[in-house]
Every structure is written in C-alpha cells, then in structure tokens.
Amino acid sequence: MAEIILHHYDTSPFSEKPRVMFGIKGLAWRSVIQPVIMPKPDLIPLTGGYRRIPVMQIGADVYCDSQVILAEIERRAPEPRVARGADWAANIWADRLFFQATVAVVFGAIGDHVPKEFIEDREKLSGRPFDMAAMKAAAGPMKAQWRAQAAWIEDGLGSNDFLGGSTPSLADIAAYMNVWWLSGAARSEAAALLAGLPRVTAWRARMTAIGHGARSEMSGAEALDAARTSDPAAAPPHDDADSLGLIPGEAVSVSSDDYGRDPIEGRLVAVTPDQVIIARTSTDLGRVHVHFPRFGYIVARA
Ligand SMILES: N[C@@H](CCC(=O)N[C@@H](CS)C(=O)NCC(=O)O)C(=O)O
C-alpha cells in the first residue's frame, strides 16, 4: 500500500482525530505540516480548492474531512475495530455541538492574543465577522454547555476505560479531540471545567497515552510528487439507489454545508451512501480522486 500522508498542523483539533486513530491501529504515516492560514500552495493542487485541515493522501487519492479520513483508515486497517454501534453519529455530535462549545471557551480565553492575520483568515473561512466581544460574552454560558457534554462522557465511561468499553472507539477519539484542544489551548479553563469529573480526567490521560503511531515528516513537494507518480485506487461501487440520481462521469461540485464552503469541481467517480468521490485532472498532477463525506457536504450538478 502507498504511504499514508496526513496534511495537518500540530495544534489542529480535527487532526488529532486521525493522529489518535493511527496510534490505536499502530500505523506508520508521513506528516506534512500545512500553514494554519491561507495560502496553502502545496495543499490546494491536491484538493482542488478544499482548504480545511486535516487532509489525508494515499498516492493519488485525497481524503477531505476527518469523517472520510477515519472511515478510510478503518477500511484499510480494520483491526482493532474502532467504529462500532452509533459511533458515526457520536462523531458528528463531537465535531459540531461539542466543538462549538469548545471554540467559544477557547477563543473566550485566548482571543486577545490571536494575531490579526488569523482573524482575517477565519473571517473569510466562515463568511462572518470574528467578533471577539461576542465570543467573550458567549464564553460564560458556553462553559456550562461544555461541562454538560463533558458530564455525558463521565457518565458514559461508568467503570470502563473507554466510551467504547475496554478498548478505544471512534466515540472516544471524537470526544477526546475537544478535551485535548481545550486542555492544550486554555489549560486553566479546562481544569475548572473538568473539576469533579475524575473519570474524564483519567480517560484523557489514557487517550493521550495511546500516542500517534509512527510519524515521520515529509515535505509538501514530496507529497505532490507522490500524487504525480501514482494512479488513483479502484473506487468503491457506485450506489445506483442514490437519492439524487447522480451518474458517474457527470460534472459536479461538492461543498461543505458549514464553513469553508468553496465548491470543489470535478467529474463524479462514485457516490456511496456515506462518501462522494470526484476525479480532477491537471497537467501537473494528472488524475487525482478527491473523497468527501456525504454527510455535511452538498453535491450539485455543475
Ligand atoms: N469537518 C471538518 C472540519 C475541519 C476543520 O474545521 N479544521 C480546521 C482546523 S482544526 C480548519 O481547517 N481551520 C481552517 C484552516 O486550518 O485553514 C473535519 O472534520 O475535518
């Protein structure tokens, strides 16, 4: 199998999800550090315009969004199994509801130290003003919302080591991303919000101890070369029962439904119930297949 390449940066909370997944599966992977703000000249040629982080690349297959990244890692390295029961739904809870509370608490705490370039970049990403006063005002009430969700983890752990029971599951990875980010970015707020939740605190230490598998660095130029010198892998079968009636070969655009909505254009390779794959061809890289999750992305005929 071609090398697994993760385009990420160390402080990215969504990137912590695949990093921990690599740890659970004991996988070796290459790390390409991408900029925290635009421009991202070594990323955009691969994705066709998707700028968010993380992005995973395996040869000429590019996976945008942690949801489709985790699904692909699980597919390629099925043991130990990580996604069980209603874990995919728990993943979206952690990515959206729990994350919204985490963002409010983190920026309420560190907002004054955020550089102007970062603020301008995130305003473009979200299409909304990065309103520091509003964020600070929201941080107080959001702390209660954050703690209520952390209390679900406390309760869900019961006498087990993990939400998944005796071994870590996707629900653990997804929930941990929020606890990990808050703990690193706003340490005293995390300590206050986790007071009286001893099982979450012990679980956080167990999750941290999993590590990230075997990471080794790679340059963005080398990653582009890996795409250039590879062909995309065989795609999964197209879902003929697709609710939009999409047909392989059609020109489509794919955009996220929350933030960073720039449409990515290509020819449809396949849709499955949970993923959409488009082909993009450029003179520099040749043919690349770009994969997105179906949930949270809008596919339209171009
Ligand atoms: N739904 C996406 C969200 C990814 C996301 O919001 N990533 C943040 C970093 S953790 C991001 O891309 N921020 C803008 C940037 O880094 O350019 C996923 O699960 O991967």
Image: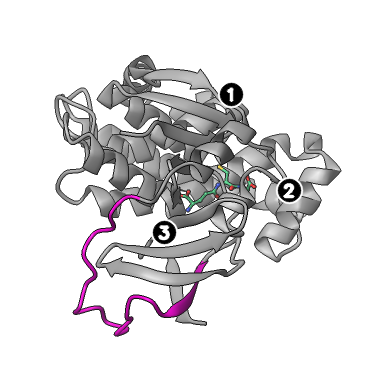
Residue 9 location (% of width, % of height): 59, 32
Left or right relative to 189: residue 298: left
Q: Nearer the viewer, residue 109 or 300?
A: 300
Q: Nearer the viewer, residue 12 or 291?
A: 291
Range of the magenta residues? 233-257
Q: Mark 2 is on which residue type?
A: Met
Q: Residue at x 46, y 37 (%)?
A: 178
- Are the residues at dot 1 and dot 3 in contact (C-beta closer than 8 Å)? no
Q: Tell me which label, 1 or 2, sits earlier in the chain.
A: 2
Residue 296 location (% of width, % of height): 42, 64
Q: Residue 253 colored magenta?
A: yes
Q: Tell me which label, 2 or 3, sits earlier in the chain.
A: 2
Residue 108 location (% of width, % of height): 68, 42
- Are the residues at dot 2 and dot 3 in contact (C-beta closer than 8 Å)? no
Q: Mark 1 is on which residue type?
A: Arg
**CA separation, marks 1 and 2?**
27 Å
Q: Residue at x 19, y 79 (%)?
A: 241
Q: Which residue is mark 3?
A: 292
- Rendering quarter of residue 201: top left
**CA separation, marks 1 and 3?**
33 Å
Residue 267 location (% of width, % of height): 45, 72
Left or right relative to 281: residue 207: left
